[in-house]
Amino acid sequence: MSAAAPVWLECSGCGHRVPLETRHPFTCPQATAGDDVDHVLVRRLDPGGVAWPQALSGSPYVDLRWLLSHGWRARALGVEDARLVALMEELDAAVAEVDGRGFRATPTLEARALACALPRPVGGLWVKDETGNVAGSHKARHLMGVMLHLRLEELAGRADPARRPRLAIASCGNAALAAAVVAAAARWPLDVFVPPDASPAVVERLRALGAAALVPAHGPVQSDPVAIVERTLEHRLMREAKVLAAIDAGLETTKELVPRVYDDAPPRIWPLAQRALEAHLRKLEAEGVVEREGGRVRRRPA
């Protein structure tokens, strides 16, 4: 059935086709250690074998399932279309319950000011605004596709919902939040790897979404997510206080701030500390506490 489907999965690097009924079609089986081919699986389609939906219900996964791989994969696995639609609607409703919004088409907006600022004239510039999407970016849209693949395995009777393998993601922001929202909606266990300079707001949100474990960028796995989040936030607040104290003392540039803010760390790691300092400055700038101009930072006037 899948061989004749007008939609299929193919490696963009070597051209190998992966059957739609493959249990976990996330990697190319032709990939070998040491080769320099970018083995990324992508969806291909035969335009003559598919059609744009005549009516749109609002849910992009339901409306476009025959242009994506999910409709054809469900058919290859023997899952009735009505059951697939019910699964998509159930997941979307769960996402909306977790995040306050489900998946819907996002607007395309004309960016006239940006077009005028370009060095060369253009006829028009349009941008896709994904900031109102689930978890605030386009990342959840991709990760929802992964979750649909996993849930289809269960729906087809090929995986036990009581023995779900843990999922994992390494991210400092949008991808981690998106994964946490989708995993929480599906009630799927998730480990999130966050770097030391991740935004405190992101860490707080991951905690609120019930990440089962938060794993730092180095060191052993932390089995107590609440404890590590609390320690991380306490450390961030301490460091943030040192940043503000240094700014109040008249230090303005990164070169000036790092030695003062990280005076408890050996100088050899100060180049790495610049990343963490930048994260603190971005947060303080977003909160309206400081302002930056020409590489210098200062307190924002009240």
Image: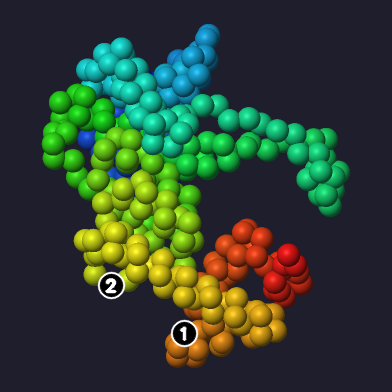
Is residue 69 visible from the viewing direction of this image?
no
Per the rendering, the mark at residue 59 is none
Determine whether the residue tagged by mark 2 lies in a helix, strand or loop. loop
Q: Position of residue 281 (x, y in %)?
A: 60, 68
Q: Position of residue 108 (x, y in %)?
A: 66, 31
Tell me: residue 209, above or below residue 97.
below
Q: How many marks?
A: 2
Q: Residue furthest top?
A: 54
- Which of the 4 quarters of the picture holds residue 164? top left
Determine whether the residue tagged by mark 1 lies in a helix, strand or loop. helix
- Which of the 4 quarters of the picture holds residue 302? bottom right
Residue 288 versus residue 222: which sits nearer the camera? 288
Q: Is residue 186 left or right of residue 235?
A: left
Q: Position of residue 170 (x, y in %)?
A: 37, 57
Tell me: residue 78, above or below residue 192.
above
Tell me: residue 91, above or below residue 138.
above
Question: Which of the colour schemes (rainbow, by chain, secondary structure, one colour) is used?
Answer: rainbow
What type is the residue that disc 1 sits on? Answer: Ile
Is residue 233 visible from the viewing direction of this image?
yes
The residue under the point 21% across, 61% down is: 223
Q: Is residue 162 left or right of residue 78?
A: left
Q: Is residue 284 left or right of residue 227?
A: right
Q: Position of residue 295 (x, y in %)?
A: 72, 74
Q: CA distance from mark 2 to mark 1?
A: 17 Å
Q: Residue furthest front?
A: 302
- Packing grade of label 2 (10 A; few <14, some 14-19, many >=20) is few
Tell me: residue 119, above or below residue 78.
below
Q: Report the residue marked by disc 2.
A: 219
The residue under the point 66% across, 80% down is: 248
Q: Report the residue marked by disc 1.
A: 269
What type is the residue that disc 2 sits on? Answer: Gly
The quadrant of the picture occupied by the N terminus is top left
